[in-house]
Image (tube, helix red, strand yellow):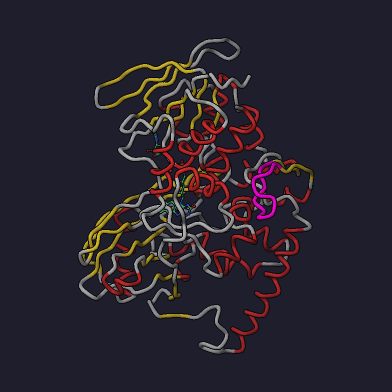
Amino acid sequence: MADVKDRVCIIGGGPAGISAAMYLQKKGYDNYEVYEKLGKVGGKAFSPKLEVNGKTRSYETGAIMGAITYHAVHEVEEFGGVGHDDGPNMRRMYRNKDGKEIFPFEPKKDFSVSKLIKLIKLKKQMKKLVEIMETKYAGYDCYGHRGVAQGKYSGLSKKVDNALELIEGENPNLKDLALPFDQFCKLNGVEEIMRIWLGPYTSFGYGYFDEIPAAYVMKYLDTTTAIEFIAMRLWTWKDGTQSIYEAANKKLLHPAHLRSEVVKVERPPVGEEGKIKVTIKDGSGERVEEFDKLIVTTPLDYFKDYADAREEEKELFSKIIHEKYVDFIAKFGSGRGPTISGYIFDNMVPERLGHAMVYYHRWEDLKANCPSTVYALRNHMGSADVSYDDTIRMMTEDLKTCGFPVEERLYEQETYYCPHVSPKDYADGWYDKLDAMQGKQNTWYAGEIISFGDMEDTCAASKDLIERFF
Ligand SMILES: Cc1cc2nc3c(=O)[nH]c(=O)nc-3n(C[C@H](O)[C@H](O)[C@H](O)COP(=O)(O)OP(=O)(O)OC[C@H]3O[C@@H](n4cnc5c(N)ncnc54)[C@H](O)[C@@H]3O)c2cc1C
């Protein structure tokens, strides 16, 4: 039973946790607490400030951009009083693995008849995809995955004209979304479009098209969002994506407790009333707080490590797979770095695991003196992982091949990225099993796994959760 007086514990102060607190507060809850183990909010929206040429500005190590379809992020922005019109422009070029500039989508540059024929085919298939997604796969463009494995849809709409309204219905064709994305494209005769989706998908660390269910591709890069990416009509933030959540956190009645890790959760047994005991570890030691309800926004596959997880939780969460996405901010010798962001398409295939796929040049006025962030994946389902050290070495060599010798790595990380389930588990109704568990032992699950590993899908999942259950 929803009661605004309930005391609610939110684990994690990333986009999911901060937006969950915001939506609770908007609904009238004023007795919630957010616990964040790091000394900052925003989670993987992490935008450290660096001084270059006497100017201190934000750089991105995690989330960078949004688009017109970022409806829930926009609600968080408005709540915190942050806009997205002040960020740097996104600019890009393409290279092959030998570092040479290529023009895969420009028929006039490096002209050849075979390239022209491929581009005409690509254009036709793009048109076909837009059509079938609106008709054969009607209902695909809502957040989350409830019912999809049963040929149904139920979630907040992503469409610009009825954004964030609950839409529900049946469409048996939606079951195809459990197929790996390459098979989905083959089934529908639109294989060429993978060349477009690859850039904002695989290079952004979301995995390879032979392993990822099509649902995770098309629900994130729905045709509207994909077109915005192609046209580079993207949102960025002057002070970085972290600033969205920092600002919203300041407007919360109860801003997140920083450096406060949840290390233990003890819940009354299923069916019994009582308080949930949460142990928090901070600079002063450990303390136990009591709550009526719990919202977990942190990786569910790690929940069992600190909580009294039931067998069904352990079993379901053990199916979660995540990507190992590595990035570092590279500093180059004076005047020796890139002047624009680059996509290295040849490296976006499993055979080139561990190689640099994309690098991000943020501040145009710094030209070749701008530190740039470079990104690679080091895992692929069915292959051995490339070691972290080898990945860093290959990324560094790739930048050198492009003509940008790395002088220093200013910051580096590997993230737990894009949690998802396999095509088989998706088809077996993993998401309906998860939904059936929502609310048991007064525990609710939010965060990236619910919809997709981007800021918008995580914030929209929090909105959906609070609207349905609180
Ligand atoms: C390199 C990179 C590039 C990206 N680019 C984009 C982009 O351009 N656009 C986009 O929309 N998204 C992008 N993303 C994805 C986006 O950042 C994530 O999807 C989003 O941050 C997920 O939010 P979350 O709250 O679910 O998880 P997280 O951001 O991971 O936040 C979880 C939080 O929980 C905390 N935590 C964990 N365990 C505990 C505990 N026991 N107690 C207390 N706190 C705990 C963590 O410290 C963390 O702050 C990118 C991410 C990365 C890494």
**Any part of residue 391 in sight:** yes
User: Bounds of the magenta span?
Assistant: 155-166
In screen coordinates, is 89 left or right of 129?
Answer: left
In screen coordinates, is 130 left or right of 353?
Answer: right
From this viewpoint, which residue is outermost toward the front?
Answer: 81
* Numbered marks: total: 0
In screen coordinates, is 387 left or right of 233?
Answer: left
Q: Which residue is found at the position 78% from the left and 57% from the top?
A: 136
Q: Quadrant of residue 68?
A: bottom right
Residue 236's x, y, as percent?
Answer: 44, 59
Based on the picture, tell me whether residue 237 belongs to the magenta stretch: no
Q: Which of 446 and 307 is in front in this view?
A: 446
Residue 34's x, y, as percent?
Answer: 42, 30
Q: Which residue is found at the position 32% from the left and 74% from the top?
A: 401
Q: Which of 414 and 208 is in front in this view?
A: 414
Predominant SS along the magenta part: loop
Q: In which quarter of the image is residue 123?
A: bottom right
Query: Quick check: which quadrant has ligand 1?
Result: top left
Q: Nearer the viewer, residue 130 or 365?
A: 365
Is residue 409 shown above or below 303? Answer: below
In screen coordinates, is 166 left or right of 352?
Answer: right
Q: Quadrant of the N terminus?
A: top right
**Any part of residue 178 in sight:** no
Q: Which residue is found at the position 44% from the left and 34% from the top?
A: 252
Q: Quadrant of the C terminus?
A: top right
